[in-house]
């Protein structure tokens, strides 16, 4: 539901929010196949993205009261994913999730199933909590409206 002018401040803010959420999603995908130490590093790597989301919420989306709690929910989900009981170091989890032992998703860059040469390997089951929290932030009604991009 973007307006006509892609360079309007609001649309720029929507794109910035989309980039921040994408950074969190990418870090979390990596997190699902990582050990405890790497998970903590990836969680901390999300901090600037969360700061950016809160800044955008305050400066451009002050009328959407649902955004700040949705950001909090997402941050809690990221912390939860980082805190799952896994070995300290997981060398090359490629087929089985180190936390829930589900079979890992092996996807190409377009999201298609790529069993042999995947670009993205992650646990869809563990990532589910993140994607649920992200969905609220993507909507136009209660979030940044990035689903309109
Ligand atoms: Zn898992």
Image (cartoon, helix red, strand yellow):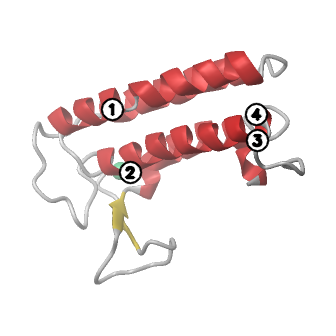
Q: Nearer the viewer, mark 1 or mark 2?
A: 1
Q: CA distance from mark 4 to mark 1?
A: 26 Å
Tag 2 near tag 4, CB within 8 Å: no
The residue that mark 2 highlights is: 29
The residue that mark 1 highlights is: 45
> Which residue is more in the foreground, 75 or 99?
75
- Categorize mark 4 by other alpha carbons within 10 Å: few (<14), some (14-19), many (20+): few
Numbered label tally: 4
> Which residue is more in the foreground, 95 or 54?
54
Q: Residue at x 50, y 77 (%)?
A: 112
- Categorize mark 2 by other alpha carbons within 10 Å: few (<14), some (14-19), many (20+): many
Q: Specify the quadrant of the image occupied by residue 138.
A: top right
The residue that mark 4 highlights is: 9
Q: Nearer the viewer, mark 1 or mark 3?
A: 3
Q: Position of residue 140 (x, y in %)?
A: 82, 40
Element type where label 1 sits in the image: helix
Q: Is tag 4's residue or tag 1's residue first in the polypeptide sequence?
A: 4
Q: Is tag 1's residue or tag 2's residue first in the polypeptide sequence?
A: 2
Q: Residue at x 19, y 59 (%)?
A: 93
| 139 sits left or right of 134 in the view | right
Q: Position of residue 14 (x, y in %)?
A: 70, 39
Q: Specify the quadrant of the image occupied by residue 56.
A: top right
The residue that mark 3 highlights is: 11
Q: Position of residue 41 (x, y in %)?
A: 23, 32
Q: CA distance from mark 2 to mark 4?
A: 30 Å
Q: CA distance from mark 1 to mark 3?
A: 25 Å
Q: CA distance from mark 3 to mark 2?
A: 27 Å
Q: Is tag 3's residue or tag 2's residue first in the polypeptide sequence?
A: 3
Mark linked to residue 128: none
Q: Is tag 2's residue or tag 4's residue first in the polypeptide sequence?
A: 4
Element type where label 3 sits in the image: helix
Element type where label 4 sits in the image: helix
């Amino acid at each position: 539901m973007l307006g006509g002018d892609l360079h309007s401040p609001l649309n720029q803010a929507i794109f910035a929010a989309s980039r921040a959420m994408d950074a969190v999603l990418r870090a979390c995908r990596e997190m699902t196949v990582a050990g405890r130490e790497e998970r903590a590093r990836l969680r901390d790597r999300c901090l600037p993205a969360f700061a950016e989301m809160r800044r955008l919420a305050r400066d451009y989306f002050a009328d959407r009261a649902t955004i700040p709690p949705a950001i909090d929910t997402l941050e809690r989900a990221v912390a939860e994913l980082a805190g799952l009981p896994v070995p300290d170091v997981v060398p090359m989890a490629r087929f089985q999730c180190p936390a829930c032992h589900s079979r890992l998703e092996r996807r190409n860059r377009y999201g298609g199933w790529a069993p042999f040469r995947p670009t993205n390997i992650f646990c869809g089951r563990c990532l589910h909590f993140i994607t649920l929290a992200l969905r609220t932030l993507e909507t136009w009604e209660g979030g940044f409206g990035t689903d309109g991009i």
